[in-house]
Image (spheres, rainbow, N blue to C red):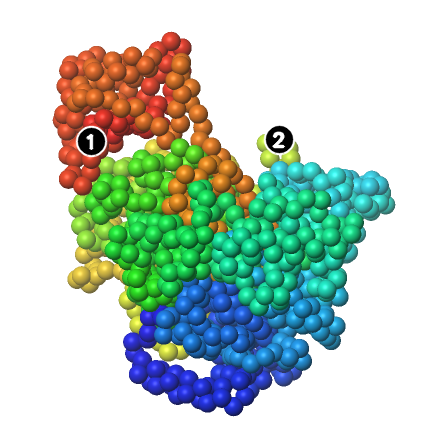
Amino acid sequence: MLPRKRAGGAEIEKDKAALNESLAKKTKSDCTISVERPSEMEDENGQANGTKVDAHGNKHAEIDEDLHSRQLAVYGRETMRRLFASNVLVSGLQGLGAEIAKNLVLAGVKSITLHDEGNVELWDLSGNFFLSEEDIGKNRALACVAKLQELNNAVIVSTLSGSLSKEQLSNFQIVVFTDVSLEKAIEYDDYCHNHQPPICFIRSEVRGLFGSVFCDFGPEFTVFDIDGVEPHTGIIASISNDSPAIVSCVEDERIEFQDGDLVIFSEVEGMTELNDGKPRKIKNARAYSFILEEDTTNFGEYKRGGIVTQVKEPKVLKFKPLGEALKDPGEFLLSDFSKFDRPPLLHLAFQALDKFRHDMGRFPVAGSDDDAQQLIACAVSINEGLGDNKMEQIDKKMLQHFASGSRAILNPMAAMFGGIVGQEVVKACSGKFHPLFQFFYFDSIESLPVEPLVPSDLKPLSCRYDAQISVFGSKLQKKLEEAKVFLVGSGALGCEFLKNLALMGACCSQKGKLTITDDDVIEKSNLSRQFLFRDWNIGQAKSTVGAAAAMSINPSLNVQAPQNRASPETENVFNDAFWESLDAIINALDNVTARMYIDCRCLYFQKPLLESGTLGAKCNTQMVIPHLTENYGASRDPPEKQAPMCTVHSFPHNIDHCLTWARSEFEGLLEKTPNEVNTFLSNPGAYASSMRNAGDAQARDLLEHVLECLVKDTCETFQDCISWARLRFEDYFTNRVKQLTFTFPEDAATSTGAPFWSAPKRFPRPLQFSSSDPSHLQFIMAASILRAEIFGISIPEWANNAKKLADAVDNVIVPDFQPKSGVKIVTDEKATSLSTASIDDVAVINDLIARLEECAKKLPPGFRMNPIQFEKDDDTNYHMDFIAGLANMRARNYSIQEVDKLKAKFIAGRIIPAIATSTAMATGLVCLELYKVLAGAHKLEDYRNTFANLALPLFSMAEPVPPKIIKHRDMSWTVWDRWIVKGDLTLRELLQWLKDKGLCAYSISSGTSLLYNSMFPKHKDRMDKKIVDLVKEVAKVEVPPYRRHVDLVVACEDEEDGSDVDIPLVDECSIWFNFLHRFWIC
């Protein structure tokens, strides 16, 4: 199904053939198939996961941080270790079970056992991506095991194909059932609930466009972290001696405390009684203050300093077993407030379906009114038995839809619920995040075509899409197959979309076409989420590998996989004809800039855009539908707050500041300065001219860095590199701190008389280097090795030998340092540069250039440096060792809590937390919307935007926002509207055409060239020139053959009151205007 390993492939296939033969033999004898049982493979699995044994003989799973870095950013090490120790059963390997199993194997549980008593049918191929036509007739679990194992060799994947006894459940910590009768589920859950320790039980079903989840984690289940958010903190500004006390925090950042939170205090000076580590309750939490429920009247008087930190308490949940919960379900978890009455109905519907299947031995037939009526009768009967809890009115039409599609397991629904259930399993394994308590029901009935479906359209066609046809009909299936879709991105979201589209049959005919593009290549860290890739694909193009894998899921997929970034630079590839041919665009991107560009393209060509994104356990989806919704760019998140430059460089007060500074120093020392040196050496004359022309403080600083690198800090041997590293340590963590505290002593005051070192500033202390301090020596090691690398110096074998390195560094002579008076240190929070201009910058620059030119003469012929580009995902390259060392030594200067290398990597590497579960859910939701887009004729209220947080869990679905309506005089329009103009207009005609609409265009430009401005008299000479000719003549723009427009910017105002007016697109095949005073000429 998926790309096979090239090297050593023969041995792999041979081993698998032998394995399958032995499994087949086992089937005949005991109906139980197992690659290897968890108990038999415990030691092997421990080695695969990197198990370590400590001094006390305890085993701890060692985590592959390169592979799981994005997941670690969500869960942390302790949760990952609990995952690695968990044995999970997944029963039912149709589409939903396959999705759950995939997510758990990617997450890295210890073992997963697949159970299914059924055999593969053609019907299964639209839901389970592990299956192919060759698997028809095989046991489902057995057919999935080998391909599932490929996703993560550290997880034991085994199978059971016979009947399952409740006693067998004791081999697992978590059991998941996706296709089990209600009677059997109650029996299994009772056993799990009463087992010691309890076994976490999950039952989930996907039936057409309806889905359900039930969780029972035992009589008492402890949640250690309900939301996964780091404890909130605040920097204290004052504490009153009152009962209760008022605590104020600095107005640097809002505090995020809630009434009733428990907090602890640290580093408080004066009122030291609060530093006892005792949790204290707060109330009246405000943006920068709160009331402490404590009498501080007799405490010491607050002086300064202090950190207040939220305490996150464990939460104990008491679950009811399924038999009890069915009768008294409590509050249902709601996902869509427009369907607040839907969960009780679906609670009945799923019980009625179970009774129908029990009585009839089958599912209701799609489109059968008799079967639907029988299911409705079951629901009515169950409802009548509820007494006071019964529903007053039952929506029989909804139950008809439920019955008709109940046999089908649709891939988008399986993907969505596979993400939800997969996350619940992680919660059960670890106690991380709040479990679903206890029922969740969902439907996407609005995904059905607007026109009524007739029974004949729902009949199976003996094809792999029969399950989908039984819900949507053959007409929509044909539209799916003939769709032309542009999928932008082939990362985690892209892999899920490729799989979903292949299973849905989208773009799976000669008339259909899927174009997927991505300019990135596969890295090891991708493999924990981007499940279409294997370790042997590392270094290959994501789009081509992903496309090949999707074709192996469905050979009919018509896919093209260019390796281009969709951007203005590739509009010759993705040209106007390409965009005009599309039916839908699906974004699978990870940055706002790219999303904005695709949004603009969709807006211009009036194409639907299906947008989604994830952040850890959170995901969101947004539908951009021409003329119905606002576009993606219509609303933007506010930019992230940046720390002032002076704070980062001289006055850090948290580890983020230290890491930001460390990353900046890395890039300056190891990338930018070596690049600058090479630029100078490549063409000294041109470089000198550019510096003289600049003649500013920045040019002076660049020259000083280049000269320092080539003269003062040049290295010829590895010992020179060690000396450089040692002197850097002294400069960074001793001398600079001595200078700072000399300039601003501890009792310094501001111009207003306030203490200079008041919160959030922290008074620093210089470090005393010691080669016996492992962290000091680790910094020297990383710095020396990287310095040697940029100078092309061979690194001796003893470079990472602590004793030999300590001996070498102790031989370095460190000159004494005396602070100087008059040194200027930037304290202005609005300053954007640490460089200060000087009246003699020109003279200094000339002197530096002369010295550089003399230095160049002494360098070996052809000498060049080797700049180092930061790479966070290679733990052997010393990049993160250097950055973590820089940041932690600086944190030690300022008494800031240090972090380990992994946490440093998250912050300095700007790693976006990511897990497979939220990714799967997001893509499932988007594909439910794709049905609507391709079917057409849906109204705004049929579409859904979603925000979900699987950690809480929270599901919030709502109609998209309609586009903003612009009104001018008796006209109105939205961003999607266009005006049509006839003829090849002159500038005068264009201005008059706008004037006829009450609009005065006072400025027209193309790129950086101004074509017309009403303030410039000379521009009146251009009035009778054609717009197209003006663009060619003034802007020097030639329209390439692949483009049908020229981008112009037009500023318009109301002719009467002079207010700016946003005008719509104007289309005549010659002039197009857009919403932001912009138009194009074809």
Specify whether 414 is left or right of 1066. Answer: right
Q: Is residue 1010 above or below residue 779?
A: above
- Point out which mark residue 752 bears: 2
Q: Residue visible at 62% across and 66% down?
A: 359
Kind of element beneath mark 1: loop
Q: Residue visible at 40% across and 74% down?
A: 136
Q: In which quarter of the image is the C terminus?
A: top left
Q: Which residue lies furthest to the front in this view?
A: 370
* Type of amino acid at the residue the image marks with label 1: Cys
Specify whether 880 is left or right of 351. Answer: left
- Point out which mark residue 452 bears: none
Q: Can residue 198 be seen in this view?
A: no
Kind of element beneath mark 2: loop
Specify whether 530 is left or right of 176. Answer: left
Image spot of residue 670 (x, y percent): 35, 58
Q: Is residue 36 above or below residue 474?
A: below
Crowd around label 1: few <14 · some 14–19 · many ≥20 (10 Å): some
Image spot of residue 581 (x, y percent): 26, 44
Q: In which quarter of the image is the N terminus?
A: bottom left
Comes first in the chain, label 1 or label 2: 2
Residue that badge 1 annotates:
1082
Q: Residue visible at 84% across and 45% down?
A: 295
Tell us which disc is closer to us: 1 or 2: 1
